[in-house]
Amino acid sequence: MTDALVIFTPSGKRGRFPLGTPVLTAARQLGVDLDSVCGGRGICSKCQVSPGMGEFPKHGVTVDADALSPWNAVEERYKTKRGMLDGRRLGCQAQVQGDVVIDVPPESQVHKQVIRKSATQRDIVMDPATRALFVEVAEPDMEEPSGDFERLSQALAEQWGITDVRADLALLRRLQPALRKGEWKVTVAVHRGNHDAAPRLLDIWPGFHEDGLYGLAIDLGSTTIAAHLCDLSDGRVLASSGVMNPQIRFGEDLMSRVSYAMMNPGGDVEMTAAVRAALNTLASEIAREAGIDPQSIYETVFVCNPVMHHLLLGIDPVELGQAPFALATSGSMSLAARDLALTAVNPSAQVYILPCIAGHVGADCAAVALSEEPGKSKDMVLIVDVGTNAELLLGNETRVLACSSPTGPAFEGAQISSGQRAAPGAIERVEIDPVTKEPRFRVIGSDLWSDDPGFAEATKAVGISGICGSGIIEAVAELRLAGLVDAGGLLGSAEQTGTARMLPSGRTHSYLLHDASAEGGPRIMVTQGDIRAIQLAKSALYAGARLLMDEMGIDKVEKVVLAGAFGAHISPKHAMVLGMIPDVPLDHVISAGNAAGTGARIALASVAARDAIEATVHEIHKVETAIEPRFQEHFVNANAIPHAVDAFPELHKIVTLPEVSFNTGGGGGAGARRRRS
Ligand code: FES
């Protein structure tokens, strides 16, 4: 026998190879996904395989005990020093001696799948832009003079097929000592640029270097900045952390920040400096939390709305404040972290920013599209990313539409009399007994309801401080279900409703949810103003969804996905009672968690995913709510709870909405007013 049949599992790829061929070589020639950092030098152990023995009727082969070359000294050394599972071999050391079936375990695959925890989410296939590679470089020679960098480039071309590599001055300064210390063997971190950029050396270490390469996936929101620190080799999340966006002091919502830039010369520069400083703090803190050196962060991926996008890049956002809302650029961007003054990470670190869809629909929406893939859905799905602005995507495999709707910060607990951010002590769940009109509630930080024994004790430490976004949605919906608020959004008086919890306040009324004033604590009320704020926010959200449905030519959707950190906490039933989202059976409302952050992680883990979303955004049709006349009509109709015109038949199957009316012709009527935040 001069050559042998080699079959790889799970890929099923097979081919004949001359006896003595290393398994790693066979894998490469067949295009089997088998990892290697050291290029087959028996150092990295990434190439581990599990050879099978005996009969393989499915493949029509019998594998003899000596189908591979004997266990060798390199493998023995590795096993003793670092440990290796029994039955495993190093693919670069074991040579083919006879027909053989070789299994490549998941951890030895470069493009390994990272299984995401939630069943509704898809897996990430690793295809990172930055990889560590071990190379042996030729020594300098008086006869054939050439620079060390040129010989390193040549070695990368010969040993890894990477050509035209670039390095900046900071790396060149460290090149010669590293090569000599490593005796002409070095490990380099190579970044494979997209946008036809040449590959770039980000770091160099003498000899074989095993410490990880890390990246940050950052969801840069108007209110909060959330980051995941991920291992670039396997996509694992090592730490997740968030900070408030310090730009809040320049304006709570996006348009007030644009106004700040318009009214104050240099205001944009101030806001850019503030967010960059926060990003540096966040990068240092998250690295400390994960126990890694922030200098080993080599990549950062950003998703953000268009205003944040411009302010991060140091581009004046004033054009985004006026029609036709032109972006400086809508394309994705690849740049050096130092260009954004991100000094906490490695000095050579690279940044990738996802593409924006249009003037009001940003890279955050593109990230949601990357994570949720509406363009692959068979069902007509509406994806709602609720934040200070709501991003909406509607579509299925034939067509996808997007818009952004100015909900304002009410859903985040702002503009609410007892509103607060979702933090320990905030009321997050509310129930009101339809007969007694008495409430019970839960606060963040305790699993007990307020009428459970032990509640007072359990909440002593955190206190009961206010109502967060999901809490106010439940409170208003429960008030509607209990007949304390009418379809127009008007709260009744104590006489009209029969409960002393309705307290007069000027010409309107407020519902007393919790009273700790006797102990010096707060009185937490739901006021008429709170209901109005929620009505405005939910009308904007629903009007945006209706506008997309009009454009699609449909009257109902099949599935609703609630995304965003807040979306994860909204109760679908209460959202539907309010008429925040179109009427669908409740079990067709799914929570996707922080889909924008997940999209950022996917883009961090995979260059192929970056290419995919860049292609996809061109196919997403953008609907501009600000200039669409029907938006106003939809907005006014959506002001009623749940809706003035749309019937909501699915909702009526599960709840009965009391037919009450508290409008006696006095003040506090439904003042539908439109506002863009
Ligand atoms: S390829 Fe590195 S040990 Fe085999």
Image (cartoon, rainbow, N blue to C red):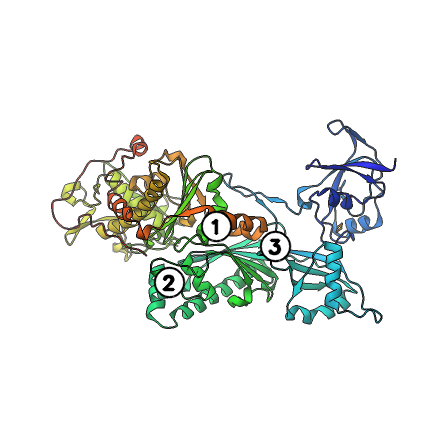
**Res. 141 image quadrant:** bottom right
Q: Are marks 3 and 1 in contact (CB under 8 Å)?
A: no
Measure how far apart labels 2 and 3 are at the Cα level.
33 Å
* Badge 2 or badge 1: first in the primary sequence: 2
Image coordinates for residue 212, horizontal then vertical, percent: 64, 57
What's the residue at 75%, 55% (across, down)? 159
Residue labelled with disc 2:
319
Q: Is residue 141 left or right of residue 405?
A: right
For residue 407, say whether it is visible.
Answer: no
Q: Residues within 10 Å of mark 2 (few under 14, many from 20)?
A: some
If the image is split into quadrants, where does the C terminus sit? bottom left
* Badge 2 or badge 3: first in the primary sequence: 3
Q: Which mark is residue 367?
A: 1
If the image is split into quadrants, where does the N terminus sit? top right
Which amino acid type is marked by label 3? Answer: Ala
Question: How many marks on residues?
Answer: 3
Residue extending farthest to the top is 57
Provide the secondary structure element on which disc 2 rests.
helix
Measure how far apart labels 3 and 1 are at the Cα level.
18 Å
Which amino acid type is marked by label 2? Answer: Glu
What's the residue at 47%, 64% (across, down)? 313
